[in-house]
Image (spheres, rainbow, N blue to C red):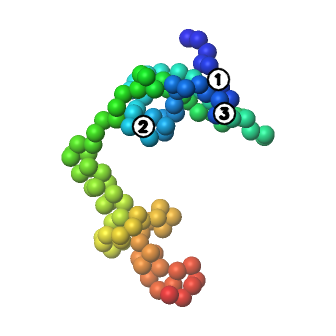
């Protein structure tokens, strides 16, 4: 296996893109290997690294099927459902609380501030 070409930050040649850049174009790597990498130097730690893929080998993003949409809706509903009262909170339950705010602070105060 040969070494990957390494480019400095913002100096990659045309024809390469990161995963996020591919996704913004409606593409995905499609099983191809990493073609190159970007490195951004930092003062006190190792460099930031971003992997690049060839745009010409990228494939279109697979469309969401109705079953995938249903599974995503179900997962999001589970994140909004309070385990304490069983109601849909209307927002994602914070992991730090583990339940909706009214169940976490039943006395009507939140962090010592009167409601």
Q: Quadrant of the N terminus?
A: top right
Residue at 78% x, 40% y is: 44
Q: Nearer the viewer, residue 114 or 10?
A: 10
Relative image position of residue 104 (x, y in whole percent): 45, 75
**Discs 1, 2 touching: Cβ within 8 Å:** no
Give the CA separation, mark 3 to mark 1.
10 Å
Give how far across and how far down residue 72 sits, in percent: 30, 51
Farthest residue to the bottom: give it. 114
Residue at label 3? 9
Quadrant position of residue 46: top right
- Closest to the camera, between mark 2 and mark 3, is 2
- Assess disc 1: are there few (<14), some (14-19) or many (≥20) residues with their C-alpha within 10 Å of its C-alpha: some
Indicate whether 91 appears above or below 18: below
Farthest left residue? 66
Distance, label 1 to label 2, CA atoms, is 23 Å
Instruction: Identify the residue position indicated by label 1 in the image.
Output: 6
Q: Secondary structure at mark 2?
A: loop
Residue at the spot of label 2: 25
The answer to whether any part of residue 83 appears in the image is no
The residue carrying pointer 3 sits among few (fewer than 14), some (14 to 19) or many (20 or more) residues within 10 Å by Cα, namely some
Answer above or below: position of 55 versus 77: above
Q: Tell me how far mark 2 sits from mark 3, CA to CA.
A: 21 Å
């Amino acid at each position: 296996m040969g070494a990957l070409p390494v480019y400095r930050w913002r100096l990659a040649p045309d024809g390469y893109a990161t995963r996020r850049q591919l996704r913004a174009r409606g593409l995905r790597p499609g099983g191809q290997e990493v073609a190159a990498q970007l490195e951004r130097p930092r003062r006190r730690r190792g460099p930031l690294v971003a992997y690049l893929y060839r745009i010409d080998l990228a494939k279109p993003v697979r469309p969401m099927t109705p079953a995938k949409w249903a599974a995503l809706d179900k997962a999001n509903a589970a994140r909004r459902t309070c385990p304490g009262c069983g109601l849909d909170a209307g927002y994602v339950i914070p992991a730090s609380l583990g339940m909706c705010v009214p169940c976490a602070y039943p006395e009507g105060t939140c962090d010592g501030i009167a409601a």
